[in-house]
């Protein structure tokens, strides 16, 4: 088991507000790490720090160190563009580009020069859509607009888009919150299938989902990492009372 | 509602006054040019006009008028009457061989007396005598000729071309610079006292009276840079200064409308800030930016004051054939004509206003159409 990303003593601020307080956590390859905790506890913030998405937020600051394969992602010689290509992200609300389905998936490979020629690009698009479990539904309508798909299809399109740049880590922020149970089940299935190739971190408010898809679970409370360990341990035998209260639905 | 009623009233009055401006009164004039010392076979190319003029065509036409209408005949015809004859002869040189009857424009006073029944007693009486020979025709020359001292000969082509050249310069300069400034302010500039200052200045500039921009253009382009007076280039530059803030403000608004989720999507797959702007932000903001440019252009098109200051108000009887040639603009032409004593210019003024309004209508309609089309696509 290898550590893909590791955060050490990370604190994050929005202006004067401290959203994360001294968090240290590892994201392992071939594992799904679930981030759980009540609303506003800093889960999204942690996720956004991992691919420096918060760089663009005015007033946001970060302390501590975050490493990808032992390399500091805030180092001077770290290219943010390359970092984001290696650490892909899927957002809570499906956000396909207002372009064709094909162009949505092909965009990443195009800007990173990952495919030579149309044939290779076609292949990348097909593989990505297959991995995202969307190929059979859209293979005859690749020129339709991505925004014309159903919500669940859009979310899988966004996953395909993230996969197309061949990332090493995939960050998912409540990817199923806008989806119905059937679409949710498909995405969960998909996460299970993707696990073998990638390091995955997923934020979820659904305890059953965390239990079903993840091997690691991290419980956050008010910006602090309260408990982090194997999912089976956390759910059967939580050490902290706040963890226990949260996963049994006492609050949150 | 009230605004709509006012607009309807305005359009109605202008239309009633102006429509007759597109029509001119002609009189049937029997002409005999058989004695004119010109060889029909040599009437080709550029020298033809010269040959006809040199042979005394104008005098022949006056003589024909005297013969047809009496001793005051020549004064009943418009200044351009003999030019109508000349053009007809150039098109059909065989007219030199036999007497013929041709419709030529009448003088402005008769024209108005015939159209509206107004004028001094003698003019009205003379018009009544001529009436059987009078006729109305669509005034094509109004669109193809430039300013003239005789209202029956004055046209808007010179002013229209001057306006189009000026607006072209304005938009070609103001749009790219304005969009670039908006992109910089929205996407790249870190908020600071400096950008705050820029922002306030831009907002204030948009509210500065246009004549101030005329002064600025006068001092900067004519004074300091020594550019030629009355030129569409200078007019365009001056109006660009005026239009720039409008375009920056609308472009910033359009850029801000781009949903944050799309920015994150692009950043999430590793788009650089420049790629984000060119691949996602600008295409999505394009309809808004375009609307802003068209509205800014329309405002500049209707602008008079700054152009007066940089000298685009001279009497210019030829259409400008270059960006640095003397020119005037449509609204300025309207202003100049409205100042004329001759009643014939009233019609010209209204007709020119109709053309200007139609132009603005087309531009604004274009903006609406683009907007709707872009919204349907996304
Ligand atoms: N862009 C921002 N600007 C200012 N404060 C922010 C911003 N984003 C988040 N915060 C604050 O940081 C804290 C943590 O927010 P975060 O989005 O990480 O919570 P979360 O755990 O993802 O919550 P949820 O489960 O509701 O998504 C909150 O108090 C929030 O108000
Ligand atoms: Mg969140």
Image (cartoon, coloured by chain):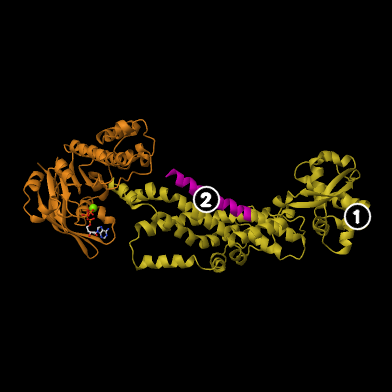
Q: Residues within 10 Å of mark 1 (few under 14, many from 20)?
A: few
Q: Are marks 2 and 1 in contact (CB under 8 Å)?
A: no
- What label does residue B78 carry, if any? none
Colour that chain B carries in the picture: yellow
Q: Quadrant of residue B353?
A: bottom right
- Judging depth in this view, the residue of A149 and A101 nearest the camera is A149
Instruction: Decide if residue A193 is on the left or right side of residue B198.
Output: left
Q: Secondary structure at mark 1?
A: helix
B304 is higher (above) or lower (below) than A86: below
How many numbered marks have been drawn onto this rendered protein structure?
Answer: 2
The residue tagged 2 is: B368
Q: Main secondary structure of the magenta part?
A: helix
Query: Which residues, given as a range, are shown in magenta?
Result: B357-378
The reply to whether residue B328 is visible in this rendering is no
Q: Specify the quadrant that holds the N terminus of chain A.
A: top left
Residue A195, magenta (yes or no): no
Q: Specify the quadrant that holds the C terminus of chain A.
A: bottom left
Q: Residues within 10 Å of mark 2 (few under 14, many from 20)?
A: some
Instruction: Decide if residue B90 is on the left or right side of residue A2.
Output: right
Instruction: Decide if residue B225 is on the left or right side of residue B143.
Output: left
Tell me the residue at 6%/52% (across/down). A239
Q: Where residue A245 sits in the image (x, y, percent)?
A: 11, 54
The reply to whether residue B205 is visible in this rendering is yes
Pointer 1 chain: B
Q: Where residue B272 sits in the image (x, y, percent)?
A: 31, 49
| Quadrant of the picture in which ligand 1 is shown | bottom left
The residue tagged 1 is: B129
Q: Which chain is orange?
A: A
CA distance for labels 2 and 1:
53 Å
């Amino acid at each position: 088991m290898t550590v893909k990303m590791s955060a050490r003593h990370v604190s994050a601020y929005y202006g004067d507000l401290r959203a994360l307080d001294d968090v240290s956590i590892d994201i392992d390859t071939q594992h799904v790490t679930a981030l759980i905790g009540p609303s506003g506890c800093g889960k999204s913030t942690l996720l956004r720090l991992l691919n420096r998405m918060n760089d663009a937020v005015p007033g946001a600051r970060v302390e501590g160190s975050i490493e990808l394969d032992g390399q500091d992602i805030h180092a001077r010689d770290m290219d943010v563009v390359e970092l984001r290509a290696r650490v892909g992200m899927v957002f809570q609300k499906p956000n396909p580009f207002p372009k064709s389905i094909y162009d949505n998936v092909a965009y990443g490979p195009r800007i990173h020069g990952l495919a030579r020629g149309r044939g290779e690009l076609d292949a990348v698009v097909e593989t990505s859509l297959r991995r995202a479990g969307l190929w059979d539904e859209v293979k005859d309508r690749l020129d339709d607009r991505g925004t014309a798909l159903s919500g669940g299809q859009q979310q899988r399109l966004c996953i395909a888009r993230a996969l197309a740049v061949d990332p090493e880590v995939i960050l998912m922020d409540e990817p199923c919150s806008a989806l119905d149970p059937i679409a949710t089940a498909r995405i969960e299935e998909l996460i299970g299938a993707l696990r073998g190739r990638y390091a995955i971190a997923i934020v979820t408010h659904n305890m059953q989902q965390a239990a079903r898809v993840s091997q690691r679970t991290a419980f956050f409370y008010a910006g602090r990492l309260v408990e982090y360990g194997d999912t089976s341990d956390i759910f059967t035998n939580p050490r902290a009372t706040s963890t226990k209260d949260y996963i049994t639905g006492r609050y949150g | 509602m009230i605004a709509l009623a006012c607009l309807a009233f305005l359009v109605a009055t202008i239309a009633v006054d102006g429509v007759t401006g597109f029509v001119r009164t002609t009189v049937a004039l029997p002409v005999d040019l058989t004695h004119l010392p010109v060889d029909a076979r040599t009437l080709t190319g550029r020298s033809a006009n010269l040959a006809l003029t040199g042979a005394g065509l104008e005098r022949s036409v006056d003589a024909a008028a005297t013969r047809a209408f009496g001793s005051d005949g020549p004064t009943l015809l418009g200044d351009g009457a003999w030019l109508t004859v000349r053009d007809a002869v150039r098109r059909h040189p065989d007219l030199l061989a036999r007497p013929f009857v041709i419709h030529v424009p009448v003088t402005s006073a008769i024209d108005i007396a015939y159209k509206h029944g107004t004028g001094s007693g003698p003019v009205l009486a003379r018009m009544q005598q001529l009436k059987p020979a009078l006729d109305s025709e669509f005034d094509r020359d109004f669109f193809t000729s430039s300013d003239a001292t005789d209202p029956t000969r004055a046209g808007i082509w010179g002013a229209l071309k001057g306006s189009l050249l000026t607006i072209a310069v304005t938009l070609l300069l103001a749009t790219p610079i304005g969009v670039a400034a908006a992109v910089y302010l929205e996407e790249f500039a870190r908020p600071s006292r400096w950008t705050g200052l820029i922002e306030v200045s831009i907002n204030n500039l948009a509210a500065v009276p246009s004549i101030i921009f005329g002064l600025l253009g006068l001092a900067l382009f004519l004074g300091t840079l020594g550019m030629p007076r009355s030129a569409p280039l200078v007019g365009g530059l001056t109006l660009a200064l005026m239009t720039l803030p409008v375009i920056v403000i609308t472009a910033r608004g359009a850029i801000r409308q781009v949903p944050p989720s799309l920015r994150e999507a692009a950043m999430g797959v590793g788009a650089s800030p420049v790629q984000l702007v060119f691949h996602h932000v600008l295409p999505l903001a394009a309809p808004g930016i375009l609307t802003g440019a068209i509205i800014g252009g329309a405002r500049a098109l209707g602008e008079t004051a700054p152009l007066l200051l940089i000298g685009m108000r001279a009497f210019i009887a030829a259409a400008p054939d270059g960006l640095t040639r003397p020119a005037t603009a449509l609204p300025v032409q309207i202003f100049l004509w409205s100042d004329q004593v001759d009643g014939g210019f009233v019609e010209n003024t209204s007709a020119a206003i109709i053309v200007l309004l139609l132009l603005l209508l087309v531009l604004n309609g274009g903006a609406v159409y683009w907007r709707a089309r872009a919204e349907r696509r996304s």
